[in-house]
Image (cartoon, grey):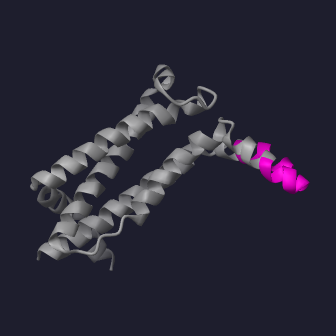
Amino acid sequence: MIATTIQNIIQMPVAIRLALGDRRTRIWGAATFLIGLGFYLLVLPATDTGGAIGLVSLRFLTVGEAGLALIMAALLGLTTALGIYGLKQGAHVTSGKTILGAIVAIVPTLLCCSPILPLVIATIASVLPAAGTLGLPIQGFIATHETWLYAIAIIFMAWGLYANARRTLYCTC
């Protein structure tokens, strides 16, 4: 099983080349990459802007956040290209892992330092008063473990890329 997994990982560039050889998948992959990159470049610095998302975020963008944005956008774009190519070839393509990774990637910045989580907890606390005490520990946990959450997001996105590459290779054989 491990040997098969390693062989599939080694074959991933072949699947990516097959998918990017098609004009339509190349366009969709590039569009997804550019949209994802723009989105991540604006969202990732939100922890430094007090939750503000927009062009103001670019002033606070660090090299590490730009690198994360580039990696996550590339994984998203390649997975999209492989998914579209697989669909064109008749493969059953799932992108649940990639979507889960994309969601996990934006959760820390949206919940850590923005007013979203306190508003949700305040709404819940209006119905259930004991829930109001949960606000600070959750935001503190997210802020403390933000790097690990990004790593988990990248792992999910890479897992989705691997699964779609594997399906693409089996579909073309």
Direction bottom: furthest residue: 1
Is residue 88 in view?
yes
In the displayed structure, 28 sits above or below 61; it is: below
Q: Quadrant of the N terminus?
A: bottom left
72 displayed left or right of 113: left
Q: Is residue 97 left or right of residue 56?
A: left
Residue at 18% of width from left, 71% of height from top?
A: 169
Of residues 47 and 123, the one drawn nearer to the viewer in this rendering: 123
Expressed as whole percent of the image width and height from the top left, the position of residue 161 reads: 32, 60
Q: Residue at x 29, y 49 (%)?
A: 77
Taking 88 as reference, is 161 left or right?
Answer: right
Residue 70 in sight in this render = no
Picture quarter containing residue 83? bottom left
Quadrant of the image occupied by residue 51: top right
**131 or 161: nearer the eye?**
131
Residue located farthest toward the top when viewing the structure as drawn: 59
Principal SS element in the magenta part?
Answer: helix
Q: Does the magenta stretch include residue 82?
A: no
On whether residue 137 falls in the magenta region, the answer is: yes
Q: Where is residue 95 in the image (x, y as percent from the top left)?
A: 37, 64
Q: Give the range drawn in magenta.
A: 123-139
Instruction: Please provide percent x and percent y for residue 142.
Output: 65, 45
| Quadrant position of the C terminus in the picture | bottom left
In terms of depth relative to the viewer, which is nearer, 65 or 81?
81
